[in-house]
């Protein structure tokens, strides 16, 4: 008669002798037991951890004016005797950057309304790009194409500028920040 087989829970059972015993076996479950969602989250954290996020920075905008472009401005289309599809307006103001570094790729957001309170730029609040803003206060000017026949005066509300700590767009040359027409708007007549 042969001796009885040891119970499965016994360390002398043949299946238990083949498996190495780890001191962590009682503490941590095997890797296959982790939920798939947790494993995916850990993998994403490892992949995305080296990339530093580029957060948007809000800047204060003051002294905003909207006025028709001067007759000598090429955007005013002085050669046309009657308004075609749009009228040229110049939006000017001051943006304040309290940081010690420049704010890059800054966009201007605002709601521009006509005399009756209707928005002039339908379904959009991004007015345009004002480029890089150095520390301190800086003036800016943008040209707007407003539908012809819009009743004036135009009113600007909820104006703010938003930029970044690092470039988020393809960069122009060092001297190409402003288009010639925008530069002409900034230069006094």
Image (spheres, rainbow, N blue to C red):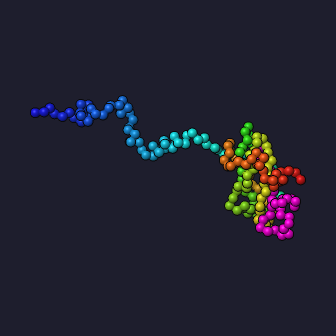
Q: Which residue lies furthest to the right in this view?
A: 189
Quadrant for residue 15, please give it.
Answer: top left
Verify whether residue 85 appears in magenta. yes
In the image, 1 versus 91, the foreground residue is 1
In the image, 156 versus 138, the foreground residue is 138
Q: Which residue lies furthest to the bottom in this view?
A: 82
Residue 105 located left or right of residue 13: right
Q: Position of residue 57 (x, y in %)?
A: 68, 44
Quadrant for residue 110, please give it.
Answer: bottom right
Q: Where is residue 39 in the image (x, y as percent from the top left)?
A: 45, 43
Q: In this view, does 173 lie above or below 86?
A: above
**Image point (60%, 41%), residue name:** 52
Verify whether residue 142 appears in magenta. no
Residue 16 located left or right of residue 160: left
**Image point (41%, 42%), residue name:** 34
Res. 66 visible in picture = no
Residue 185 located left or right of residue 132: right
**Image point (72%, 43%), residue name:** 103
In the image, 174 versus 46, the foreground residue is 174
Q: Where is residue 168 in the image (x, y as percent from the top left)?
A: 66, 47
State which region is magenta.
69-96
Q: If the image is split into quadrants, where does the N terminus sit?
A: top left
Quadrant for residue 11, please give it.
Answer: top left
Residue 148 located left or right of residue 166: right
**Image point (68%, 61%), residue name:** 123
């Amino acid at each position: 008669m042969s001796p009885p087989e040891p119970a499965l829970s016994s360390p002398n059972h043949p299946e238990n002798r083949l498996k190495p015993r780890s001191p962590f076996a009682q503490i941590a479950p095997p890797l296959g037991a982790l939920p798939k969602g947790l494993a995916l989250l850990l993998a994403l954290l490892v992949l995305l951890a080296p990339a530093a996020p580029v957060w948007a920075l809000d800047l204060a905008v003051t002294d905003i004016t909207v006025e028709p472009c001067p007759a000598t401005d090429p955007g005013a289309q002085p050669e046309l005797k009657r308004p075609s599809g749009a009228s040229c307006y110049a939006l000017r103001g001051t943006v304040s950057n309290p940081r010690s570094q420049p704010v890059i790729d800054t966009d201007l957001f605002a709601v521009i309304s006509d005399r009756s309170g209707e928005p002039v730029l339908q379904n959009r609040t991004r007015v345009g790009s004002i480029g890089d803003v150095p520390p301190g206060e800086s003036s800016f000017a943008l040209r707007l194409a407003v539908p012809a026949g819009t009743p004036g005066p135009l009113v600007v509300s909820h104006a703010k500028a938003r930029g970044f700590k690092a470039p988020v767009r393809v960069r122009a040359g060092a001297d190409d920040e402003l288009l010639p027409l925008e530069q002409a708007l900034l230069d006094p007549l």
